[in-house]
Image: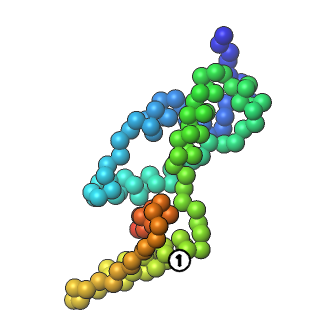
Amino acid sequence: MTQALSHDDSVEGLPSRARIAELILGSCPSLDTYAGWQHYRTHCDLLVPASVISPKQWSMLPESRQYDYDLYRELTNANLPLQDTPMHDKVGRLIRRRLSGNTRKKNDPTRAGVMISGWGNYGKTASVISAGAVR
């Protein structure tokens, strides 16, 4: 049973099936290379979470788009953006200040650093990467 999509049947912001496949299957260059870092900096905030729809709205979608919606929702939920917490903001400001100051040092080979410690899976690396990627 195929039905034409009316304007109300589409989910706003839901990418095409080809774009969802590209997001899942596409490879990204490693962050420890210049090309990988530049790719991350230009793409880090582009994954927009799926819009929230009601079960009734979901049931009105064609079956293929229901699957696309569920898949995209899983993708965006597995790649949630960092939460802006007071500690994340403070660490970000400190790192950006150190990076800015260290780029201005001319003759001193010693550069000020930052040590971040804590339990695993608390976002230390992600916080540092996002602070350095600010455009």
Q: In this orientation, does residue 52 appear?
A: yes
Q: Is residue 62 above or below residue 97?
A: above
Tell me which amino acid carries mark 1.
Lys
Coordinates of residue 84 in the picture (x, y in percent): 59, 66
Coordinates of residue 133 in the picture (x, y in percent): 42, 64
In this picture, residue 69 sits left or right of residue 112:
right
Q: Label 1, on which residue? A: 90
In this picture, residue 56 sits left or right of residue 105:
right
Q: How many marks?
A: 1
User: Which residue corresponds to the image point at 33% horizontal and 84% vertical from the top-left?
Assistant: 112
Mark 1, residues whose alpha carbon is within 10 Å: few (<14), some, or many (≥20)? few
Q: Residue 105 sits in which quadrant?
A: bottom left
Coordinates of residue 26 in the picture (x, y in percent): 38, 38
Q: Which of the pair 4/69 is nearer the observer?
A: 69
Q: In this orientation, does residue 127 appear?
A: no
**Quarter of the N terminus within the rendering:** top right
Coordinates of residue 110 in the picture (x, y in percent): 25, 86
Q: Is residue 107 above or below residue 25?
A: below
The secondary structure type at the circle numbered 1 is: helix
Residue located farthest toward the bottom when viewing the structure as drawn? 108
User: Which residue corresponds to the image point at 78% horizontal and 30% vertical from the top-left?
Assistant: 56
